[in-house]
Amino acid sequence: MSKVIRTRMVKELKARLKDVTSGVLVDFRGLDGKSADSFRKELKAANVHVDVLKTSLAVLAFKDMGVAGLEKTLTGMLALVHGPDPADCAKKILAWRDKNKKLEVKGGILEKKALTPAEVKALSLMPDRKTLLAQLASVMQGPVKGFAVASNALMQNMAMLLKAVEEQKAKEGGAAQG
């Protein structure tokens, strides 16, 4: 392939992947056409995209995009599987791999950093984005709720103290008159 054509193809690949911040690299060698089609359809239904990559062009494109450490990973018949939620994407791929052992997870990308297959598996064990946001909101709510409970208890204690002082004064006032 001439240098001009290769440069143009790398440029097109970079343009296609410019918004991709995370993804899982899979080797789909050994998958028959029916399985590959089923794989793509299942992922497409979950808003996850599959881009088949030419490895030599992918090496150059990822290098130009600032993703380092993928050189050893980018071999064989390679596809980049990516979607809006990296954890969800990794879960779907690993679940599909459990059904079809011919699919091999080669690694991944997360925020321009290369991931090993073990790190992709760890990513799949994380909760999805919605769950993480809910957990974050709950954690942030904790101190505010604690402050509200403490200030409420402070006001209740102050009210009880004032009532006790009032009763004490009433007793002293009644004893002084008698």
Image (cartoon, rainbow, N blue to C red):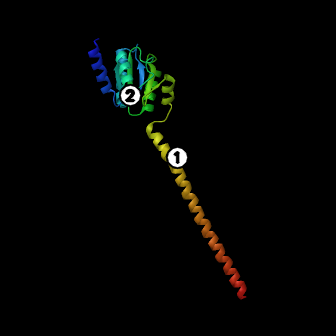
**106 relative to 123, above or below:** above
**53 relative to 137, above or below:** above
Q: Amino acid at mark 2?
A: His
Mark 2 residue crowding within 10 angstroms, few (<14) / some (14–19) / many (20+): many
Quarter residue 49 falls in: top left
- Residue 59: x %, y % from top left: 38, 19
- The residue located at (34%, 27%) in the rendering is 17
**Which of the two labelled residues, at mark 2 and mark 1, occupies the earlier sequence position?**
2
Q: Secondary structure at mark 2?
A: strand
Q: Which residue is mark 1?
A: 139
Q: Is residue 37 visible?
A: no
| Residue 175 relative to residue 55: left or right | right
For the C terminus, give its image quadrant.
bottom right
Assess whether mark 1 and mark 2 are in contact (beta carbons under 8 angstroms): no
Quarter residue 129 falls in: top left
- Residue 42: x %, y % from top left: 37, 26
Which mark identifies residue 82? Answer: 2
- Residue 100: x %, y % from top left: 44, 19
- The residue located at (58%, 65%) in the rendering is 155
- The residue located at (62%, 72%) in the rendering is 162
